[in-house]
């Protein structure tokens, strides 16, 4: 058998099934579309669920893919063994009600033995215990001896996942030889050792399971083949593990080169770290290229966790500088032919990796400071066990690895409450599970739209028109069911054979308008894409009665459509300007385009400066005034890529795409409605720029009449301000500066008076000091002072008292406590942070700080004397 490379094997598989009449489809994004049951795509069939259920009609009844997948269920074991990995590629051939067991099994055998060249004597099929049909195909038709066909039970050879399509499966094991075996007499297919590797799995989805053990025969029987590309490569290349196959070995070798260490040279911990980095950087590179950003929840949290684990293991290997980008470059180089988005998004991937890795090192330092504080507190209390809650806070909030926490504690003669930490982890998992909506098999709530015939189609014919006569009403839905008629006052969704109404998509809101028949009228409030991209007109019957089968006149609200188009066309100009001003790492992360305004989310890692915002706004307006023609062309996706057209993350593009160009300035893939010339935008004005999520900024802007309304409002406010300042409009700034200077001088006088009050108060409260073992301790409530004055008072008192602890409070509704301790008092055991914490607790608050200075708040001012007494008592206990 020839030792084919990973990229060769992928192409061989896809080409083979193309020759068997399958449509080759590109890998779907790792981000699930319309499927709330999954955080990330974890199997080749996952993006194809609608075709398996019959909710959508597939582009062909035979499909083949190589799907990028991520599974993190076993993340803690990645690296510890050579078996585990988060990222993998799943080869698949699928039949949606076309061929079934006979073809699937024959083709699997043909591919492995004739195309790849595997030795037939080393291949062992398995079937479900009761699947005599599959057994006969293997034995009587393909010719595999009975003693090499294994029957396994439901746990191994029956695929089901809760309620939904399910069925038996047939796997193929490859005997890698005795050197990988366990030596047991019972060793064979299904053994836990590494000798017999499963390289193929044909799932025969022939039943529908209700999740309670009851099964019914499906009318449409399907084939779902899953084969791990990495596993096939391990068998083909005759290597020990997936970390030794050509593409992963290249990544692994780069890690070793950067760290200056060898792989499998006797240092197990180094090997663990090398495998973790190899797998995790591969995973995060693909995730980022699919538009996933690091965050503290959902798939963004998975990305951040993988990234930080990789960076942490780099430190364990002795790498003391950012290195993830260097490793990611190897991932991109080795896989970009099959996944061109990797090369297209290289700058973007590198920018995010760089920022997140640097951020992690900073949080690592913050976590170390907090852990050192925990250690100091434990020592003060003569304790030796850090609570699981504190360890989890370090892990979850600061990304501080729990194993590092345990190591540092051990150096101080302390331990970690591992059970408590595990309990906190489990609680987090439970919260995440409960936060997910209960859904059907497709991971989406069941609605009336699930009852629509999958073959229902609506043709959108509205790019150049806003009205249409003679459309056929195909379906009407009420709130809960399909209906034949609907009367005035009823809420409906109307589906027609053709429509000029644009359905909400790509951030652009759907059209509004009216649908009129001979007997009634519907006010369309929004237009949506229902299941299977069916266009639904959602609204209310406002006149008479409408009926299924009637002819309809459809009229879009043209002024609303035009206003939306202004904002949409401006959004394209905005994205290009942002990339020109900020850099090519800028990618669209979301948008909302409606008649009133536009909102554009984009990847960037710091607030934009005023200068940058002015540059972007000016550039967009220059292109508006340049009166660029807006043109659209339909072409193949490959041809569109050659034009340099920008594409949206996660968008599912067909073989033909619509390219929208604005002169030579902006070229994007877009299905939305646009102007015919940028001059129709009128003017463009940015209203705000702010953070939207980690690594994502948001610009809100207006165009056309919206911009004119904004300028009018600003002029009205300028007139009002000028009137208040008693100045001319052109001298408002000068007048405001003059007033500001007057206020500054008055504030200085106020501050001076406050300092005098504080100094005067110092003389009044000195008598409250008590001697505690040679240290003066003073507690006083000063309700009329503010916090700044309270601190001035504290400094004055320390200066006059010598070695001392000063405990002060101010405020009449809500309390503020300030505790100060001199160096001498701290050496004697005083700790301002601990003292102020106890005071705040008495008043229903919290806070803390350093040994020599701390501040806290209290909610209940009536408890101020109790709080001061508690603080005084705590100080006395601490002083030695």
Image (cartoon, rainbow, N blue to C red):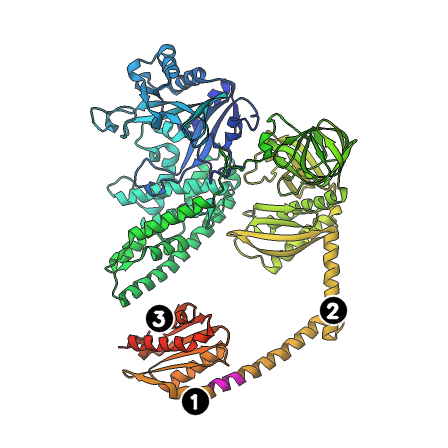
Q: Earlier in the sequence, mark 2 or mark 3?
A: 2
The foreground one among 629 and 279 is: 279
Residue designated by label 1 = 763
The foreground one among 589 and 314 is: 589
Q: Earlier in the sequence, mark 1 or mark 2?
A: 2
Q: Secondary structure at mark 1?
A: helix
- Residue 26, visible in the rendered structure: no
- Residue 365, visible in the rendered structure: yes
Q: Which numbered disc covers residue 226?
A: none
For label 3, the crowd category at 10 Å Cα-Cα, with few meaning under 14, some 14 to 19 and many 20 or more, is many
The foreground one among 347 and 75 is: 75
**Does 215 sit left or right of 487 as displayed?**
left
Establish if 358 lies above or below 509.
below
Q: Is residue 758 magenta?
A: yes
What secondary structure characterizes most of the magenta part?
helix
Residue found 47% across the figure and 84% down from its top: 758
Residue designated by label 3 = 834
Q: Secondary structure at mark 3?
A: helix
| The magenta segment | 753-759
Residue found 38% across the figure and 49% down from its top: 427
Q: Which numbered disc covers residue 720?
A: 2
């Amino acid at each position: 058998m020839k030792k084919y490379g990973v990229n060769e094997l992928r192409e061989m598989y896809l080409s083979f099934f193309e020759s068997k009449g399958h449509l080759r489809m590109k890998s779907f994004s790792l981000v699930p579309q319309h499927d709330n049951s999954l955080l990330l795509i974890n199997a080749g069939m996952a993006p194809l669920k609608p075709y398996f259920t019959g909710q959508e009609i597939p582009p062909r009844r035979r499909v083949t893919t190589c799907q990028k997948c991520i599974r993190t269920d076993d993340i803690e074991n990645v690296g510890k063994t050579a078996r585990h990995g988060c990222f993998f590629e799943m080869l698949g051939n699928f039949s949606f009600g076309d061929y079934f067991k006979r073809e699937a099994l024959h083709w699997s055998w043909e591919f492995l033995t004739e195309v790849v060249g595997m030795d037939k004597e080393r291949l062992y099929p398995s079937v479900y215990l009761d699947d005599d049909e599959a057994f006969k195909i293997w034995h009587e038709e393909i010719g595999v001896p009975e003693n090499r066909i294994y029957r396994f039970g439901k746990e191994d050879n029956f695929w089901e996942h809760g309620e939904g399509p399910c069925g038996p499966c047939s796997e193929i094991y490859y005997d890698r030889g005795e050197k990988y075996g366990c030596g047991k007499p019972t060793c064979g297919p299904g053994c836990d050792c590494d000798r017999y590797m499963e390289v193929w799995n044909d799932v025969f989805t022939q039943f529908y399971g209700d999740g309670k053990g009851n099964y019914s025969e499906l009318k449409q029987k399907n084939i779902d083949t899953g084969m791990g590309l990495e596993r096939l490569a391990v068998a083909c290349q005759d290597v020990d593990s997936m970390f030794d196959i050509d593409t992963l070995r290249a990544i692994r070798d780069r890690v070793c080169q950067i760290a200056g260490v060898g792989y499998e040279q006797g240092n197990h911990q180094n090997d663990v770290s090398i495998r973790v980095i190899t797998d995790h950087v591969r995973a995060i590179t693909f995730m980022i290229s699919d538009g996933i950003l690091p965050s503290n929840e959902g798939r963004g949290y998975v990305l951040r966790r993988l990234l930080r684990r990789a960076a942490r293991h780099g430190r364990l290997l002795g790498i003391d500088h950012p290195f993830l980008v260097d490793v990611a470059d190897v991932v991109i180089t080795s896989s970009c032919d099959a996944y061109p988005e990797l090369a297209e998004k290289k700058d973007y991937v590198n920018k995010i990796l760089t920022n997140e890795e640097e951020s992690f090192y900073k949080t690592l330092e913050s976590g170390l400071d907090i852990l050192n504080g925990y250690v100091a507190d434990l020592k003060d209390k003569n304790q030796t066990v850090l609570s699981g809650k504190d360890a989890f806070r370090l892990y979850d909030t600061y990304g501080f690895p729990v194993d590092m926490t345990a190591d540092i504690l051990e150096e101080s003669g302390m331990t970690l409450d591992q059970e408590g930490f595990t309990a906190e982890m489990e609680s987090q998992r439970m919260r995440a599970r409960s936060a997910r909506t209960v859904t059907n098999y497709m991971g989406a709530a069941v609605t009336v739209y699930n009852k629509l015939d999958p073959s229902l189609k609506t043709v959108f014919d509205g790019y150049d028109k806003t009205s249409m006569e003679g459309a056929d009403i195909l379906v009407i839905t009420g709130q809960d069911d399909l209906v034949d008629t609907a009367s005035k006052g009823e809420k409906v969704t109307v589906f027609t054979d053709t429509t000029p109404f644009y359905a909400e998509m790509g951030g652009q809101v759907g059209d509004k308008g009216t649908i009129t028949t001979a007997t009634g009228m519907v006010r369309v409030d929004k237009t949506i894409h229902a299941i299977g991209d069916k266009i639904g007109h959602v609204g209310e019957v406002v006149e008479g009665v409408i009926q299924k089968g009637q002819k309809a006149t459809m009229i879009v609200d043209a002024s609303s459509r035009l206003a939306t188009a202004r904002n949409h066309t401006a959004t394209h100009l905005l994205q290009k300007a942002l990339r020109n001003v900020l850099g090519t790492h800028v990618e669209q992360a979301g948008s909302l385009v409606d008649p009133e305004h536009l909102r554009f989310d984009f990847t960037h890692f710091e607030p934009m400066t005023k200068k940058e915002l002015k540059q972007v706004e000016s550039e967009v307006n220059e292109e508006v005034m340049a009166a660029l023609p807006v043109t659209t062309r339909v072409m193949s996706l490959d041809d569109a890529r050659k034009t340099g057209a920008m594409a949206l993350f996660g968008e599912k593009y067909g073989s033909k795409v619509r390219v929208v160009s604005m002169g030579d300035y902006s070229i994007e893939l877009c299905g939305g409605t646009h102007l015919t010339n940028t001059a129709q935008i009128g003017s463009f004005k940015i209203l705000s720029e702010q953070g939207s999520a980690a690594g994502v900024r948001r610009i809100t802007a207006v165009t056309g009449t919206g911009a004119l309304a904004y300028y009018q409002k600003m002029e009205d406010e300028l007139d009002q301000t000028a009137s208040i300042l008693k100045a001319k409009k052109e001298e408002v700034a000068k007048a405001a500066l003059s007033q500001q200077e007057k206020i500054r001088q008055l504030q200085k006088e106020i501050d001076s008076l406050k300092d005098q009050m504080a100094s005067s108060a110092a003389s009044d409260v000195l008598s409250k000091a008590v001697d505690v073992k040679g240290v003066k301790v003073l507690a006083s409530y000063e309700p009329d002072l503010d916090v700044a004055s309270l601190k001035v008072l504290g400094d004055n008192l320390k200066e006059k008292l010598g070695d001392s602890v000063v405990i002060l409070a101010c405020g009449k509704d809500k309390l503020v406590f300030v505790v100060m301790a001199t160096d001498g008092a701290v050496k004697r055991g005083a700790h301002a942070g601990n003292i102020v914490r106890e005071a705040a607790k008495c008043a229903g608050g919290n806070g803390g700080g350093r040994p020599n200075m701390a501040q806290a708040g209290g909610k209940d001012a009536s408890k101020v004397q109790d709080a001061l007494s508690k603080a005084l008592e705590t100080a006395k206990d601490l002083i030695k």
